[in-house]
Every structure is written in C-alpha cells, then in structure tokens.
Amino acid sequence: MAIRSFVSVMDNFKCVSCGEPLELDETVLKQDQEQCQNQTADDSSNNSAAPIVHRYELPNYSLFVGTSCGTSLDLSQLPDVSSSSDDPQGIGTFFAFTDKLHKLVHDDNSAIEHPMCQSCADRLLDYFDQTLSEAEQECREYKKILDSLDAVNIDAEAQEAQQHLAKLKKDEENIKETLKEVQRVDQNLDLEIEAEQKKIELLTEQEAKLWRRYRDLRRKVLDLENENLSAMNQYHYANSCLKKLEESNALNMTFHIWHSGHFGTINGYRLGRLPDQPVSWTEINTAFGQAALLMHTLVKKAGLKLERYELVPFANYSYLVCLQSGKELRLYTDGGVKFNWHPRFDQAIVAFVDCLCQLEQRIRQLVGVDYNLPYKMRGDKIEDGGNQYSVRTHFNSEERWTKAMKCLLTNLKWALAAILPIEESHTSCSTSSV
C-alpha cells in the first residue's frame, strides 16, 4: 500500500534533459517489496514474545534531482505511517525503497545528472557509442602512422649519427688540446704579469723618490727666486734712492730758502719784521745763524778766502770778526727801542753783505762769464727794480728792512745754485783722475 502511494509521488520527478515526468520501472518495486517482506519475517521470528513497537524517524532529506530541474521530493506528500502499526511490512518497505531511491539519485560517482528518462538515456548511449567509434578510428590511424615510421631505414640515420659523434669527439680532443695550450700560455702570462708588477712597483718607488727630490729642488729654486727678486727689488730701490740723492743736493735740503708772504725764510725761520706781524727776535737771530752757516759752507766750497771779515757761525749767536780791528760784530740782537739798537748788529749785517759780494766775484771767476746775482748789492744797499733798500735797522722802516732781508736771502739762494754745478764738476774730475 505504501509502495503504491509512493509511485504516485514519483510523478513529481522530471527528466533533467527533456523535462518530461519520470516513470519508475516495476522491477524496482518488485525487488524492493520482496526484500522488505524477507526482512519483516526475520524480525517477527526473533521478537515473537515481545510486543512489536515500530518507531521510524524520517530522515531530514531534501531530494534534489538535478541542477537543471528545480523539482524536489516533498516529504509532506508521503502517506502518514506513524499510526500504521497494523501494517509494519508496508512501512518498512516504504522506507527501504525511499533510501535506495535517494542513493540512486544522489550518486556522486556518476558524471550524468539524474533523474533521466528512457529516451534521453538512449540518446546519451548513442552519443557515447559514436564517440567511442571515432576514438577507435583515431587509434587505428595512429597505429598506421606508427607502423609507417617503423618502416623507415633506421640504419642510415644511425650511421650518420655515428659519423657526427666521431666528428664531435675529434673536435672535443682538438678543443682540449687548444685549452691546454691556452692554459699554458695563461700561466706564462701570469708569470710575466707578476714580473711586470714588480717592475712597476720598483719604478713607482723610484718615481716617488724623484718627485720628492724634485719638490725639494723646486722649493729651493723658489726660495732662490724669491731671494733674487728681493735682491733685485732692493737694488732697484737703492738705485732709485741713489738717483734721487744724485739729483738732490745736501745744501738745498739742509738750507731751504723760500718765502712766506712778505718775509724771506730759511728752513722755515722768517727774517724780517712788520708792524702787523711782529716776528720775535729769537726767530730772526735763528734765521741769521742759518744764513751765516750757509755762507760759511759756500765760501769753503768755492775756495774763497775772505779779505776783510771772518765769518763765525754759532747758531743764534753767530758773529763776524773784523780782520783789521779784531772787533766782533754780532749777527744777533736782543731788540729794544727802535732808535737805541746796538750799532754792531747793523755793522754785522753790512759785513755779511760784503762777504756775499766777495762770493759773487768768486763765482764769476769760476764760471768764466759775466755772472751777477739777481739783486745788485753795494755797501749797505740792495737794489730791486731801481729802488734801493738799506740792510740797516737804524733810521729804516720795518717794511723796507724786511724787503732788503728778502732780497738778501734770494741772492744767497742763487749763489748756492751757482756753486753746486761747480762742485759736482770738480768732484767728477777728481774721481776720474783717481
């Protein structure tokens, strides 16, 4: 009864290929029914004394019958067998059939999707038969090709291979001999390289020594060049100083005669007085002392022997000595009231002018031409542009006396300039004679 009920349920299964409902073969049902009856008879004989209680627990199956078909076995459609204790045989048969059907449909070893109808199964078998016949045909063709390859003359190829192998062995021997020769040459080259390396090290050491020696000699050369350059610089400096000294004159440098406004100056000392510029008598005495020293030097250089006076330079207290009377004529004064000055001071100035006139005559003799100083001197007068200025302070204005002193210093400067060439010519002549 249970089997027939389940057969009605099988109408829900469809073929995964064509989608048609499946029909269960009757032989399956008959075999399952016989097995179930035999199993029930054995159970009844073993448990006849005890009451028969059949408890069946339905497995939690969800029977899927293919990926292409969405049909599943709905267990709610199965008949209610929980209260069918009067027919245990039918219940056992039902569950045994269900388990077998589940194993058949869900066999993982099969590559074919289940369930499948008879016509689709026949077509599948026909496809497999065709595929098998094609595979057998390919196998026969491969066998023919293999037989044709076996028929080729293998002896000729083997002989050719033997000849090629012999040639390769000969080439190998030649290459080995060449390799030995190359290794021998390589060893010789290594020895030569080692010898050359030693030579290079020796030459490098010698080069380093030569470079050190060269640096020492170069440093000495540079030192000598510096010394030579320093000596040349010193020589040029000394030569320039010598030229400056030759061009210059000691007398010009020692006795610098110039002017400052209305005053004549010698070494910066003014000789003269003005009402608005009262020069101290100490400065005037110093200027006369410098002039007396210059006059004395020029007289000596000119080789002149004064006739009437002897000049005694003594700084601020220079004086002249009269050769006839032996009087001292002081070339300095302490000053005082204008008309009470010492007359010897004026006499000393007149005597100084007389000495300058004698020097002028000596220069004229030495030069050999008509030589005259720029300002004509006569007695106690000095002429400038037709005007005569007295060198005396007594009964004379300060302006005119200052003018006379300026002219006196100018004549002394000119006498100095005239004597210098004469002295140089005499010096050169004496040097050449020596």
Image (cartoon, rainbow, N blue to C red):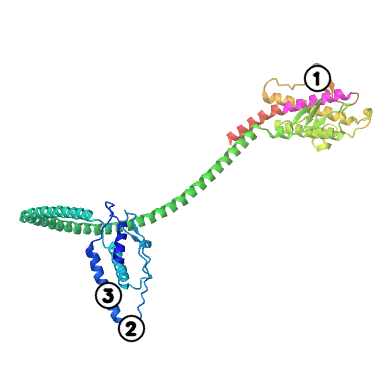
Considering the numbered disc 1 on the image, is that residue within a helix, a strand or a loop? strand
Residue 370 rendering spot, x and y as whole percentages: 70, 20
How far apart marks 3 and 1 lie (CA) works out to 189 Å
The residue to which callout 1 is attached is 383
Q: Residue at x 23, y 68 (%)?
A: 31
Residue 129 rendering spot, x and y as whole percentages: 16, 55
At label 2, which amino acid type do we have? Ala
Question: In the rendered picture of this protein, how many numbered marks are placed on residues?
Answer: 3
Q: Earlier in the sequence, mark 3 or mark 2?
A: 3
Near-viewer residue (391 or 220): 220
Q: Quadrant of the C terminus?
A: top right
Residue 53 position by quadrant: bottom left
Nearer to us: label 3 or label 2 = 2
Residue 208 rendering spot, x and y as whole percentages: 41, 54
How far apart marks 2 and 1 lie (CA) works out to 197 Å
Near-viewer residue (275 or 132): 132
Considering the numbered disc 3 on the image, is that residue within a helix, a strand or a loop? helix
Q: Label 2: few (<14), some or many (≥20) within 10 Å?
A: few
Near-viewer residue (215 or 138): 138
Answer with left or right where residue 301 lies relative to residue 232.
right
At label 3, which amino acid type do we have? Gln
The residue to which callout 2 is attached is 49
What is the residue that sits farthest to the top in this orientation? 386
Q: What segment is highlighted magenta in the picture? A: 397-415
Nearer to us: label 3 or label 1 = 3
The residue to which callout 3 is attached is 39
Answer with left or right where residue 97 lies relative to residue 220.
left
Q: Earlier in the sequence, mark 3 or mark 1?
A: 3
